[in-house]
Amino acid sequence: MNPLEKIKYLTIKYKKELPQKISLIKSVFNVSLEKGFTDKEFISFYRSIHNIVGSAATFEINEISNTAKLIETEIYPYYKSKTNPSIEDLEKLKELILKLTVISNKIEQDSI
């Protein structure tokens, strides 16, 4: 496999795996909503979002990367201060995570 074919293969593979990665983020977020954001959940949620920002940008999936970056920006102050997000910010995060889910499902379907 030449380098261009390998990049194409990895991009398609990433797009197919994206809904599962987003689902995991959504699960961590939902658990955190129920229990409160403990250090463990905050770190897991923040790192997962941060990884999506970078990996989606690497594969030039800008809509995912940009939406994940909005989530990362929204959660960062709470991550640093180790405080729970406000109710308004939680609602904003829910909407952004839903948007991320919809986009990733569409991308997966388009890559089939």
Image (cartoon, rainbow, N blue to C red):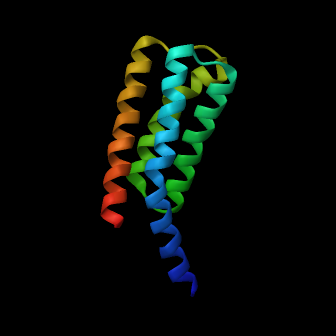
Reply above or below: 107 against 45: below
The N terminus sits in image quarter: bottom right
Q: Position of residue 102 (x, y in %)?
A: 32, 44
Reply above or below: 1 against 110: below
Reply above or below: 5 against 36: below
* Residue at left offset 62%, top offset 24%: 79
| Image quadrant assignment for residue 109 | bottom left
The foreground one among 80 and 36 is: 36
Q: Position of residue 34 (x, y in %)?
A: 51, 16
The foreground one among 47 and 14 is: 14
Q: Position of residue 21 (x, y in %)?
A: 51, 47
| Count of numbered badges drawn on the protein | 0
The C terminus sits in image quarter: bottom left
The foreground one among 62 and 38 is: 38
* Residue at left offset 53%, top offset 23%: 31
* Residue at left offset 44%, top offset 60%: 15
Residue farthest to the right, as pictured: 39
* Residue at left offset 58%, top offset 40%: 48
